Image: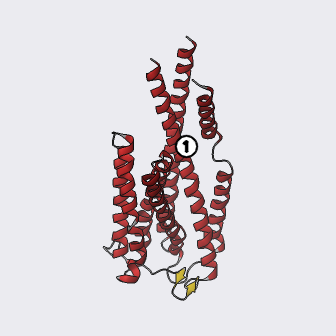
Amino acid sequence: MKNLGFLFAANLAIWGGIVFYVFTLMKRHRDLRRDLDLLKETLNKESSK
Amino acid sequence: MSSAEETDEQEIAEKSDEGPGLLLWLTAAGGIGMLAAVFIFVPTERTEGIVQRIMYFHVPCAWVAFFAFFIVFICSILFLWRREREWDIYAHASAEVGMLFCSLVLITGPIWAKPIWGIWWTWDPRLTLTLVLWLIYAAYLMLRLQTGEGSTRAKYSAIIGIVGALDIPLIHFSVLWWGSQHPSPKIITSEGIGTGIDNSMGITLLVSLGAFTLIYFLLVSLRVNIEKMKDEIDRLKKQRLYSH
């Protein structure tokens, strides 16, 4: 099992990198969803006045 | 708000909420299959030992990065030709995902090189050109972050996207043209397809390539959704501004 640490490090970098990117995408999606809902609500209120 | 606009808005909201569905399940299945192939199915390589298994991640990362930048190249040409926002969105999404995988190539390469070559990095043509590719698309994404008129920014980004992709064939052929410490192609060689690699290793590599390609499509679809939501927000903001 020589060099097992290198294999572990490579896997950590790949899966850590992909998971981190997915989390940033999910956060951006959640924030935009909230903004979109808020904006729609405001527009609806304004149009009903 | 007109009924047509409301329908568009609902479609975007529904699409962004329903998630990737089938693609997500296919990617998960591909990922499990890949891990089983890499850690259970394929035997340990005789000369390099267990560290050689990095190849089943490093090579697919390189493939996805090149494929992503090739998509940027195609979408950028289509954007400059037709001036449709849709192509700009796909180019941007693909460039961002391509940068992720290009970064992973530049990280996993040295991790594999250290135990095999005895060094983390060398200014070899293939390695250097891959770093140049990373820098070109880093510039592309930095330009995207700049504020300013959308279509001008998209136009300059498209030019960088096209020029950057010209580095990809140079990277591929660098090992053949200039010699390199980096191994030469093993799948497609001058003697045919798959002749330079053992069957079980070839199958495992193909499974990994498939799984990483699915991850690419999943990430791009998520990124495209985000960009479309941003456009929708901008549209509604403008609509609100004009209604006052």
In this rendered view, identify the residue nearer to me: B186 or B38. B186
The quarter of the rendered structure image containing the C terminus of chain B is: top left
Instruction: Judge from the rendering whether residue B221 lies leftward or rightward of residue B41; answer left or right.
Output: left
In the picture as drawn, the residue positioned furthest to the top comes out as A49
In the picture as drawn, the residue positioned furthest to the front comes out as B82
Residue A1 in view: no
- Report which residue position mark 1 lands on: B225
In this rendering, the count of numbered labels is 1
The spot of residue B25 in percent (x, y) is 68, 53
Q: In this view, does B111 lie above or below B179?
A: above
Q: Is residue A35 above or below residue B117?
A: above
Q: Is residue B182 above or below residue A27?
A: below
The spot of residue B219 in percent (x, y) is 55, 52
Instruction: Judge from the rendering whether residue B4 lies leftward or rightward of residue B109; answer left or right.
Output: right
Quadrant position of residue B1: top right
Q: Residue at x 57, y 19 (%)?
A: A44
Quadrant position of residue B199: bottom right
Instruction: Judge from the rendering whether residue B82 lies leftward or rightward of residue B225; answer left or right.
Output: left
Per the image, label 1 sits on a secondary structure element best described as: helix
In the picture as drawn, the residue positioned furthest to the left comes out as B123
Tag 1 subunit? B
Q: Residue at x 62, y 73 (%)?
A: B204
Residue A11 in view: yes
Amino acid at dot 1: Asn
The spot of residue B71 in percent (x, y) is 49, 59
Question: Counting other residues with Cα less than 10 Å from the Cα at mark 1, is it few (<14), some (14-19), or many (20 or more)?
Answer: many
